[in-house]
Amino acid sequence: MSTLSYEATGAAQQALEQHLPALVEDRIATRIFAKDHTLWGSDAESESAIRLGWVEAATVSQPLVKDILELREALRAEGVTRIVLCGMGGSSLAPEVIAGTAGVELTVLDSTDPDQVRAALADRLAETAIVVSSKSGSTVETDSQRRIFEQAFNDAGIDAASRIIIVTDPGSPLDKASREAGYRAVFNADPNVGGRFSALTAFGLVPSGLAGVDIQAFLDEAEETAEVLNEDAPENIGLALGTALGGTTPLRNKIVIAEDGSGIKGFADWAEQLIAESTGKLGTGVLPVVAGPGSPEVAEGADDVLVVRLVAADADVDLAENQVAIAGGLAAQMMVWEFATAVAGRLLGINPFDQPDVEAAKVAARGLLDAQPEPTPAAFVDGAIEVRGGQWLGSASTAAEAVSALLDTLAADSYLSVQAYFDRLAYAGFEGVRDELAAVTRRPVTFGWGPRFLHSTGQFHKGGPAIGVFLQVTAAAAEDLAIPERPFTFGELIAAQAAGDAQVLEEHGRPVLRLHLTDRAAGVAQLQDIVAALSSRASATES
């Protein structure tokens, strides 16, 4: 097993000292692994009773390895060397981290942006198989992606059924329909594991294994880590991390997760969903903020922020005040963070296994698709940017003034959420505005690509504390893309998802600035210039 280590200072160390004795005395670790569904209160019992399968996933999933590897070899013998994963949230984030850390190619299609979908279709279709991952099969994004690939295979003279692999819960509508359709393979995952806890189930293993990851070694590491976590001992790193996440007093409800040499590619993005969706409810919770070791939030030392640094096992770590350093292999870390999130849920007094506010944005998007209303008129247009916002816009007449007006709504305990609904691969550099805005606002800033963040931090935005301020950026595609046998296009779908989420946030009283880029490249450049100018002014003021 990879070496696990944990170190903490300040509020995190105080939380450990405050809560660890009771956690050990109450046998929380062994009770979690015994699937004691009473640990999170009576209101959570019905849900937790069917959501604790993750504690034994590393063992239960062992029989999957043989079938996955045999299918991988069969596909390669047929010249199929490219795997595309059609999935959202828990179905996509774990495989992306697993494959990325292992250094193997896996195309993750977790978008409804027409340009990003078209790019995935255009790349080596003859060598491609797709993995469609959805617990029920009702996820509109995943269903749409399957439909467009199936059509593309058929149009190219490829037997589509031989190139489609399904991962779903046993007995789900997708399970039944896929077997009737004769798809290449159907893998069933443990239905007693929620999506964000599913890294060690078929949802994490099938796409990763087909792409070329050594999933046997991955499971073995996780299985050994589970044995270590299943101990009511002061040395239990999972208990320690759980106290840091949910036990600080007063609660430091922004957890800045900084990759600092761990070698795990994209781990913070996976942890972001796990923590935000598990804890952000009933007006409480902790917001994960994905950052780097040099990001402003790491150095700022704000009273409501705790920094968790992901480090290498042999790193010589010099921790500042109110920081945590944690090291370990990917599978080990995934087990530790899942366990710690469950512990944090107990300390916060919430059910870590439900997501009551995720559905609201889906319902709003569906309603907009069905009604096909005219877009809300823009307050004004500035260059390639249409601007929409609330009364807080005031007299703003340029996009720069609108962004400044939004930032003026930030309070001392607020966070800013930047949400970009367009091609995350072609415009990956746009994420750079996150650090600049954090420096300008001196507040934590999250960055999410839509619609995938709706299956992640979207729960915290609506169910967590009412302290979020939102910058939503949508962009016109060069050309729309039809969805086979659906009355709406990919462009209409992503527009409805953005508008639906903004609608729900505004109904919750959250400030939302909506910027629509009428020309994608020009609008991105214009917005980057606006943020850069704000950053320069902030730097000049400080100096």
Image: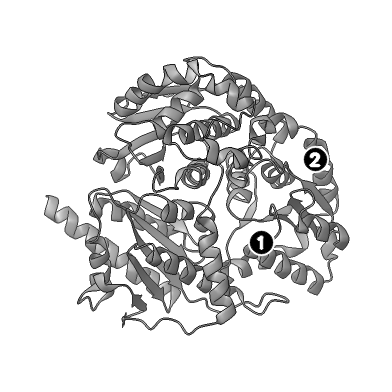
Left or right: 354 with respect to 534?
right
Q: How is the image coloured?
A: one colour
Judge by depth and name the residue closer to the eye, 15 or 447: 15
Residue 19: name its quadrant: top left
- 302 sits to left or right of 224: left
Tell me the element at label 2. helix
Q: Which residue is under mark 2?
A: 69
**x 79%, y 74%: residue:** 155
Tags 1 and 2 touching, CB below 8 Å: no
Q: Is residue 477 above or below residue 313?
A: below
Tell me the quarter of the image containing the N terminus. top right
Residue 419: x and y, percent? 42, 61
The residue carrying mark 1 is 142
Residue 444 image point, x, y percent: 32, 48
Badge 1 or badge 2: first in the primary sequence: 2
Is 91 in front, or is 277? Answer: 277
Q: Is residue 382 left or right of residue 97?
A: left
Q: Residue furthest front?
A: 42
Disc 2: CA contacts within 10 A as few (<14), some (14-19) or many (>=20): many
Density class for disc 1 (Cα within 10 Å; few <14, some 14-19, many ≥20) is many
Q: Amino acid at mark 1?
A: Thr
Which amino acid, by three-letter code, is at mark 2? Leu
Q: Nearer the viewer, residue 271 or 318?
A: 271
Q: How far across and how far down the image is residue 5, in percent?
A: 47, 22
Q: Which residue does the image show at 83% across and 46% down from the upper left?
A: 71
Can the viewer see residue 262 in this picture? no
Q: Quadrant of residue 471?
A: bottom left
Direction from residue 184 to residue 197 in the image, left or right: left
Residue 520 visible within the image = yes
Q: Is residue 139 above or below residue 65?
A: below
As drawn, the label of residue 218 is none
Q: Look at 13% across and 50% down and name the residue there.
A: 542
